[in-house]
Image (cartoon, grey):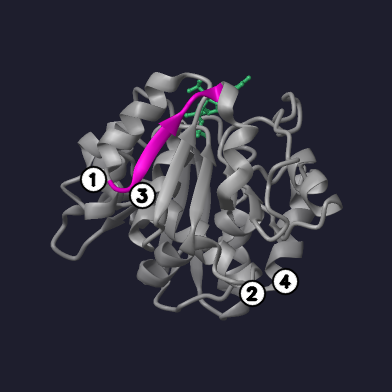
């Protein structure tokens, strides 16, 4: 393989189910770019070695997925302010000066997904309810703060995790008890499930929607299945909904732009292409 072909990839453990190669290969083909993007299964012993040998391996960039988004922070030289705030990195770039730059584009992907798929009155002008306080919730809450949401309530099974998240991120955030999740919806303009509940093989999210205003937007970051019970029930009562696959597609954009020099677009065709792989 010639040296002038840009190489990038995604690392995680396990990595077989990563949809990132599917996204990047689609864009590379579509834009006629001679690049390579591969998935690498990396165990925790070889993690630091993989990052420090990016230049040797000819890798320009790496996406980082589960379980290394936090761990990888100690192996990069510079962090974006967003990655520092969230405490996690999903995109590492080997810069021309030889330094590794860590960024987090999950929150960007989250906001862009909503913007692309929801044309109603801005969901982000009122009260946002965030269910869950894990890694995904950290980037989502930070992105909601950055787009100027007036009030965010975090509701998590383990209240302490929600309190820590609120403190770390800062902003107009309050924490409510898990038992208050049903009544919390009464004033919401936006609700997002950031937990793993509703994913194939997991129990559904138990959330009664009776009090939710009919114009509130509902989003689930779970995309397998593409229509979770939360989204289905929201649609049935007439609420606008956005599913979760777009967050994955949009979070890949900044890495592609930096590494391959083209600003890629998320289209219906890309979405179908990636979703077709999901059942493999
Ligand atoms: P991710 O990085 O994908 O966000 P995570 O960090 O493991 O994954 O977070 C999982 C989230 O789902 C957490 O908010 C977790 O709640 P806890 O902080 O109480 O663990 C939530 N979660 C997972 N299983 C759950 C369940 N059965 N009921 C309620 N919340 C659950």
Secondary structure state at the residue bearing disc 1:
helix
Percent across and percent down for residue 20 are 57, 53
Mark 1: few, some, or many residues within 10 Å (few <14, many ≥20)?
Answer: some
Percent across and percent down for residue 236 are 86, 51
Among numbered discs 1 and 4, the one appearing first in the sequence: 1
Considering only vertical position in the picture, is 142 above or below 11? below
Among numbered discs 2 and 3, the one appearing first in the sequence: 2
Quick one: 199 or 161, which is closer to the camera? Answer: 161
Percent across and percent down for residue 214 are 73, 56
Q: Left or right: 22 with respect to 250?
A: right
Snapshot quadrant of residue 3: bottom left
Looking at the rendered image, the disc whose residue lies closer to the viewer, 1 or 3, is 3
Considering only vertical position in the picture, is 180 above or below 280? above
Among numbered discs 2 and 4, the one appearing first in the sequence: 2
Q: Can residue 101 be seen in this view?
A: no
Q: Are marks 2 and 4 in contact (CB under 8 Å)?
A: no
Q: Is mark 1 within 8 Å of ligand 1?
A: no
Looking at the rendered image, the disc whose residue lies closer to the viewer, 2 or 4, is 2
Q: Residue 119 carries which label?
A: 2
- Disc 4 designates what residue? 268
Q: Left or right: 128 with respect to 61?
A: right
Q: Are marks 1 and 4 in contact (CB under 8 Å)?
A: no
The region drawn magenta spans: 171-178
Snapshot quadrant of residue 197: top right
Residue 172 within the segment the image draws in magenta: yes
Q: Which mark is residue 84?
A: 1
Classify the position of ligand 1 by quadrant: top left, top right, bottom left or bottom right: top right
Secondary structure state at the residue bearing disc 3:
helix
Instruction: Report, in whole angstroms, how far the alpha carbon at label 2 lies from the one at label 3.
Output: 22 Å
Q: Residue at point 76% right, 32% down? A: 200
Instruction: Report, in whole angstroms, how far the alpha carbon at label 1 lies from the one at label 3.
Output: 11 Å
Looking at the rendered image, the disc whose residue lies closer to the viewer, 1 or 2, is 2
């Amino acid at each position: 393989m010639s040296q002038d072909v840009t190489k990038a990839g995604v690392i995680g453990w396990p990595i077989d189910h990563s949809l990132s190669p599917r996204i990047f290969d689609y864009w590379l083909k579509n834009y006629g770019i001679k690049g390579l993007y591969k998935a690498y299964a990396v165990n925790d012993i070889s993690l630091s070695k993989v990052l420090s040998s990016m230049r040797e391996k000819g890798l320009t960039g790496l996406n980082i997925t589960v379980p290394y988004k936090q761990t990888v922070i100690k192996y990069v030289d510079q962090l974006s302010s967003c990655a520092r705030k969230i405490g996690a990195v999903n995109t590492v770039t080997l810069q021309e000066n030889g330094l590794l730059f860590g960024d987090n584009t999950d929150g960007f992907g989250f906001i862009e997904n909503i913007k692309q798929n929801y044309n109603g009155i801005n969901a982000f002008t009122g009260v946002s309810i965030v269910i869950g306080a894990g890694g995904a919730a950290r980037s989502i809450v930070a992105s909601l703060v950055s787009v100027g949401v007036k009030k965010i309530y975090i509701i998590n099974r383990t209240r302490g995790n929600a309190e820590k998240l609120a403190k770390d991120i800062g902003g107009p955030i309050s924490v409510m008890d898990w038992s208050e999740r049903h009544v919390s919806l009464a004033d919401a303009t936006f609700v997002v499930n950031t937990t793993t509940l509703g994913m194939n093989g997991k129990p559904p999210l138990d959330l009664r929607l009776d009090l939710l205003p009919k114009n509130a937007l509902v989003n689930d970051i779970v995309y397998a299945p593409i229509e979770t019970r939360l989204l289905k029930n929201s649609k049935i009562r007439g609420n606008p909904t956005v599913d979760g696959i777009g967050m994955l597609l949009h979070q890949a954009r900044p890495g592609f732009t930096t590494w391959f020099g083209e600003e890629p677009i998320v289209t219906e065709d890309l979405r179908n292409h990636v979703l077709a792989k999901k059942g493999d």
